[in-house]
Image (spheres, rainbow, N blue to C red):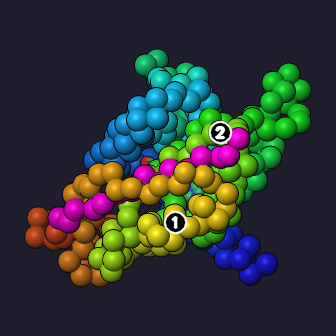
Amino acid sequence: MASAVANLRAVNAGNSRFNKEALSWDSRPFVNEASQAAAKAITAKLKSLDWQPKQVLEIGCGTGILSFLIAPHVDRVVAVDAAEGMIDVLKQKIEKAVAPKNILPLAVLLEDPEDPQLPSTNAATKDGARQKFDLITSHLVLHHIPDLRGVLKTMLGCLAPGGRVMLTDFQDYGPEAKRFHALSKLDGVERHGINVEQMSSLMSDVGFSNVSILPEWSMPKMVEKFDGEFGAEGKPANDSQGERVAVPFVLCYGEKPR
Ligand SMILES: C[S@@+](CC[C@H](N)C(=O)[O-])C[C@H]1O[C@@H](n2cnc3c(N)ncnc32)[C@H](O)[C@@H]1O
């Protein structure tokens, strides 16, 4: 009960922040570059496995930047996000002529693999068991999730036997990782990146096999020199503010046993 209440609090904090930021989300260079790097890391992993997924679920898709990069290579991406504002922006992007037409946007806080909002295996009646996926992606999301074990169990339940997760987020590389977010952007932040050892044992514990958490890329980010330097906007107001640091990112990989 206590953790359900904590979860709800975190979701509300996160939703209000991301609903507010949705309209300007795509204008951020860091956000776009990070998704491009995630797509590159996922593509390289697929190539190394010599495997091509058809049905993909992206959890915490935001405005769908990563979904857009993955969609041309698969049959369908079901793109879910808890913040309706993010999904509204994604829906508008999909309506444009040049957009891929195989993305299904859903505003849902995914906590149950049998959530009735997920597509059904019975397209005609929409009843019965929910669709299972070959691949689950989730980029820059895990550090917002209060109950990591819970979301990993949900992911396992959403995969088809033999399905895989490829989850990308920044790494908890020590006390400095805290600077990834400006002080005013800490709403809904549950941890300062992914701790490799903890994540690895959690994924194995939940039931994933062949787990690996590997550093994939690093990218520069402007961060505060001291807490609160960027004020309420959370970004530098002039050239003298902030400093550039290199942020490491990891790809968390696991398979659902057949
Ligand atoms: C930092 S944003 C990243 C968005 C997108 N992946 C990107 O990189 O542009 C984190 C997103 O995760 C979503 N989110 C957090 N927890 C979620 C959950 N349990 N289910 C669905 N979405 C979630 C938030 O609403 C937010 O849009």
Above or below: residue 16 compared with residue 256: below
Horizontal and vertical percent position of residue 239: 11, 64
**Residue 199 numbered mark, or none:** 1
Question: What kind of element bears circle 1?
Answer: helix
Q: Is residue 33 magenta?
A: no
Q: How many numbered circles are shown?
A: 2
Q: Quadrant of the N terminus?
A: bottom right
**Residue 162 numbered mark, or none:** 2
Residue 212 relative to residue 207: left or right: left
- Say whether residue 88 is visible: no
What range of the chain is rendered magenta?
A: 244-258
Chief secondary structure of the magenta span?
strand
- Asked if the residue at tag 2 contacts the one at tag 1, i.e. Cβ–Cβ closer than 8 Å, the answer is no
Residue 153 relative to residue 174: left or right: right
Q: Quadrant of residue 119?
A: top right
Q: Residue at x 42, y 39 (%)?
A: 45
Horizontal and vertical percent position of residue 234: 32, 68
Q: Residue at x 29, y 82 (%)?
A: 227
